[in-house]
Amino acid sequence: MNKQISRLAAFVLAAALLTGCGASGTAASSSAAQDMMSSESMAAGGAESALLPEDVSTAENAQKLIYNADLELETTSFDAAQDTLQAAVENTGAWLEYSEMNGSAEDQDRRLYYTVRVPVDNYRTFLEQAGQSGSVLSLNESAQDVTASYIDVEARIDSLEAQRERLAELAAQAETTADLLEIESQLSDVQYELESYTRQLRALDGQIAYSTVNVTLREVATLTPTGITFPERLGDAFSGGWSAFVTFLQGLILTLVYLWPLLLIAAAVVFAVRSLSRRHRAAHPKPPKPQKPGKGAPPASPTARTAPGAGTALPDEPSGKEEAPKPKY
């Protein structure tokens, strides 16, 4: 009996010991899992914080700037100016994104439009060399800070790449076809968004690495005055007025030359109208106007006759009827 009781107590004690060990093992494993999760979350938090460096706005190496410029020039030697622009493009490692030219050399009204993509390191050098091709009328520059947009796109790309890796692992562990199809659908959406943000990042990289400069070159007969001081502006005004007068005369002469057929026809019509008018007057002369009697002279009798070649009037001829004598009172 005592042996049975001893065996039963030993069994209960062994069971209790085994239960305690299992609980401690479970607690240990749970604690390890929590530690692992916390370490992973800390790592994730560190990765996210790494995407946003401190003092992004003040760190020069973290700033992402896009430079743009509009340069307008004019010249009296168009071919030489065009060669100078081409040399500036080649010397700075730039390339032409767009080019257009119109006008003619005979009329001296050619215009050249360039859109040049310049490496950001040679941006200022290109502006200086391009400005030497002619007289600078205007230069407008702008700088766009896209640092925040750039960092946001990078963070989205990193997040989508991590999501794609997790979906790929889940697809490998899928047990049913329905689960596999659902995971592949989500994976396709993630891949589409990832490609879209990747294209945006590449576009930003291109705009940051290569500045955009729009160049307009105009051919003129006389350069536009660009004086600053009053004597320079006064001299420019005199020269500009004389140039405008000469240009007006040239334009007037050219207009008359262009219109010479019409002028010739108009002169012929005027000559013909005047000739016809003269002939009409010669064929139908106007009757002479009656002369008015002079002052103090008695009016001539309607029956009085003037002898030819004499200045005195002849007496009136008898009319055949004698006038009745007037009665005397």
Image: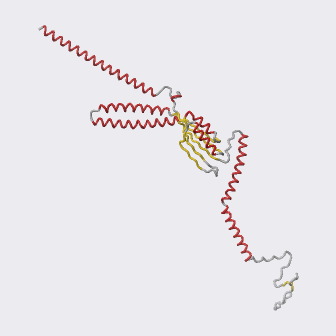
| Residue 319 position (above or below residue 195) | below
102 with respect to 318 (left or right): left
| Of 130 and 48, the residue lying toward us | 130
Q: Position of residue 139 (x, y in %)?
A: 61, 39
Name the residue: 87% across, 82% down: 309
| Residue 82 position (above or below residue 121) | below
Quarter assignment of residue 19: top left
Quadrant where the image shows the C terminus = bottom right
Quarter assignment of residue 156: top left
302 with respect to 18 (left or right): right
| Residue 287 position (above or below residue 100) | below
Q: Position of residue 236 (x, y in %)?
A: 71, 43
Residue furthest to the top: 2
| Of 76 and 161, the residue lying toward us | 76
Q: Position of residue 109 (x, y in %)?
A: 63, 49
Name the residue: 46% across, 28% down: 52
| Of 95 and 20, the residue lying toward us | 95
| Of 111 and 297, the residue lying toward us | 111
Name the residue: 47% across, 33% down: 150
